Image: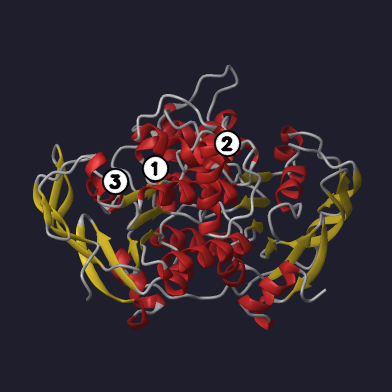
Amino acid sequence: MAQSVIKVVDVKKSFGAVKALKGVSLEIAPGEIHCLAGENGCGKSTLIKIISGVHAPDSGHIEFGDKIYTKISPIEAIMNGVQVIYQDFSIFPNLTVMENIVFNSELKDRRKLVNWKRFRRIAEQAVDRIGFKVDLNARVGDLPVADKQLVAICRALMFNAKLIIMDEPTTALTKKEVNALFKIIMSLKEQGIAILFVSHKLNEVFEISERFTILRNGEKIITGNTSELDDKKFTYYMTGREFEDLRFKPKNVSDEPLLEVENLGLTGYFHDVSFSLKRGEILGITGLLGSGRTELALSLFGISPADQGKIRIKGQEVVIDSVASAMKHNIGYVPEDRLSEGLFLPQSIADNIVISELENISSKSGVIDKKKRRSEIEKWVKELGVATNNPNNACNTLSGGNQQKVVLAKWLSRNLDILILNGPTVGVDIGAKHDIHAILQNLAHEGLGIIIISDDLPEILQNSSKIIIMKNGTVVAELNPEEIVENQLSEYMMGGNE
């Protein structure tokens, strides 16, 4: 390896009795794109915070060239060329693009007076460096997520960055935006800037990184060349488990449709959407952001009632104009953002599981039957494999994958006929993702009708018995997942096969 930009040597860090890092080492060369991967709680965030000076290691050291630090401050990290772009980008939504880009450098230089000409000159140089076309006077809060990220990258380049750490940079991006980001990353590489790309998405790791390091339970499991890695090895190193990637094959599909949607529409969002769903099927719905896919889900669950077309359940025409009416027809909905829409995070795991079935575990006078409550909680914790030793713990103590299992438990306890999931594994680790897919496939085999809405194309292909693609608010294709591959699916989404 060439002279390294950074070398982390045998770093250890504990928080009380929790050993977050157990002697982790890492080395990155100039212009190298290095993937740091691992499940939630593996130590990735702690390592990033040590490199950037937020946390001090208990032992070990960091090297920048011939400088050795047993402890580094955030300013020292910045002066050594380290910049971190967190998931929230740490930008000021009320300020303009130009103001966001120059803000930190103005603080560093301790300037007291605003010079708008200097601001514009510096900002223009920063956006030109990565070929970012944007209105410098635009308010950052009004920009799409992808552009906010590019503003953060431009700001990072203001400090003679040598190493840019990107923490889960593609979480909220569409495939098209991810491709644009990767072009920017490659241009940074050509400028000699190293990238530490933090991700657990297999396809992205293989596409963008040259080398990788995988952490598990605070330990470095392996470092190597990405070219020597494949899906199975990557998953095993991440989780310590081996999985079979089986495509969903429906069994015991009902003869009659469970759900029929005919020319459904919601003015301004989607129109002329038609499909059917039988018991035992999993319908995959995909499309770019703005295609109408989420609005369709919200209409089917009564949050944003459709104003055109018909819905039939078990052959009977129904009106779903509220969440209550959707629940009355045994429809459940797992939202895209489980943290703000799916769970009561400060409340217990137990309360979150039983919240939707209180009437079933209560007496006529409204008193909860403690025995029934305990039985339901134990049943779903066991059946869905929720990793907790105490269901009375707050829900926010769980990992993302286990939180998603709690959302599933909340709905499955109601004896559903139809389950709609919007982004079922967003922000979920590889191991939990496999578990959730297995749960959904088993539920379909047991007779549930399932709709998965996702832009994770491997997820859609692996778990669907049929796929519909939405674009500009309507269905543009209905496909058999056994007759199509990921690239073709992506082309349909972009409009190439219309």
Front of the two marks 3 and 1: 3
Looking at the image, residue 368 sits to the left or right of residue 82; the answer is right
Percent x, y of residue 303: 73, 36
Front of the two marks 3 and 2: 3
Residue 342 visible in rendering: no
Judged from the image, the secondary structure of the residue bearing numbered disc 2 is helix
Percent x, y of residue 279: 70, 61
Q: Which residue is mark 3?
A: 78
- Disc 1 marks a residue whose amino acid type is Glu
First in residue order: circle 2 vs circle 1: 2
First in residue order: circle 3 vs circle 2: 3
Query: Image point 59% across, 35% down: which residue?
Result: 96
- Disc 2 marks a residue whose amino acid type is Glu
Mark 1 closeness class: few <14, some 14–19, many ≥20 residues within 10 Å: some
Which of these two is toward me, 315 or 466? Answer: 466
Judged from the image, the secondary structure of the residue bearing numbered disc 1 is helix
Which of these two is toward me, 453 or 255? Answer: 453
Which of these two is toward me, 150 or 206? Answer: 150
Q: Which residue is mark 1?
A: 378
Q: CA distance from mark 2 to mark 1?
A: 24 Å
Q: Quadrant of residue 498?
A: bottom right
